[in-house]
Image: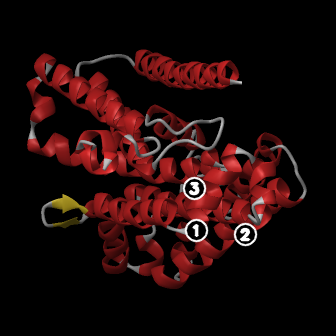
Amino acid sequence: MNNKQQSPLKKLLGIRGMGAALTAFVGLIIIYIAFGVINPAVFSGQNILNLLRSMSKYLLIGIAQSYVLITGNIDLSIGSVAGMSAMITATLMVGGMHPVPAILITLLCCLVIGVINGYLVGKFKLPPFIATLGTMFVARGIAYMVNGNRNTDAIATGVGKETGDAFQNFFYYGKTFGVYNTFWIALIVFVIFFFLLSKTRTGRHIYAIGSNVEAAKLSGVNVVATTIKTYLVSAGCACLVGWILCAQAGMGNMEAGNMYEMYGVAAGVIGGVSPLGGTGILLGTFAGAAVWQTLENGLNMIGAQVGIQRVVIGVIVVAAVLLDVVVRNGQFGKRKKKN
């Protein structure tokens, strides 16, 4: 009877992490309107399209980091894996390989990094900061070496203008139903991984590990396998971001993806994904990525310096983490009182 009498809003807020996600969406609306009042060009159709396209990279990298964060771990190699992806794909295409096999080979290379991260953290119990710091340097080193420590030529020089344009249009410049393909790609990936995290047994195991790894083991959760899966998701999403960066530039850049691991943390944390593990939903990551890009876009359109942009976003990230810690401490305090 009580469940039937519960209002839809209460049911919605009862979903784990939904409160933080909705808060992030409210913040997004306020921020967007505020920037639009200062500069009406923010409301223009083309700016909205550009904002959605740029946000997509942060959403993908946010999904990658969120999966890992929910288990209580972190992946510092994401940005370097994205850079490695861009360089390997571009180098193969400049060498004359068709984009499809180039993409498949690149994906395999990136997933190997994900498996290594998963084994180091899950099987060998290395601190995730140290394990993924090491693979971060390895992946970036590969990005440098794959083309002899230099950026690649334009991909069209190897596969031809028509094929090169098709690759760039598919991942970045092309539109479907008036919206850039980059956004549709990110949206499809978001829906898939949102379902996997919220509706499958693997998703429940990911939350269980982040909440209490020892209790998860006693409940029969395969911690090693689940940890590897989260790092595979991370590497796969980072690989996709690399293809987008390659398509955007039309070439491979050795520094592509630089600092993206931090962008992933920011997108997740702003949306309520706890860096302490066990809390957060990908809907929040979507909101966090949108907040991040809206701030960057709005500050840029009102003429704020890059330094100011970084300070504002940095303060918001710290505030989000601090809020999470305060809320958790409050919860723990209530439990102690009951005992």
**Disc 1 target residue:** 201
Q: Could you tell which of marks 2 and 3 lies nearer the N-terminus?
A: 3
Residue 47 coordinates in the image, percent (x, y): 17, 40
The answer to whether any part of residue 18 appears in the image is yes
* Distance in Å between CA atoms under marks 1 and 2: 24 Å
Name the mark on residue 82.
3
Residues at discs 2 and 3 in contact (Cβ within 8 Å) = no
Residue depth check, mark 1 versus mark 2: number of the one nearer the observer: 1
Name the mark on residue 112.
2
**Amino acid at pointer 2:** Val
* Distance in Å between CA atoms under marks 2 and 3: 13 Å
Q: Could you tell which of marks 1 and 2 lies nearer the N-terminus?
A: 2
Mark 1 packing: few (<14 Cα in 10 Å), some, or many (20+)?
Answer: few
Q: Residue at x 70, y 64 (%)?
A: 226
Q: Tell me the SS state at disc 1.
A: helix
Left or right relative to 44: residue 289: right
**Amino acid at pointer 3:** Ala
Residue 239 drawn above or below residue 53: below
Q: Tell me the SS state at disc 3.
A: helix
Residue 251 coordinates in the image, percent (x, y): 47, 60
Q: Residue at x 61, y 21 (%)?
A: 334
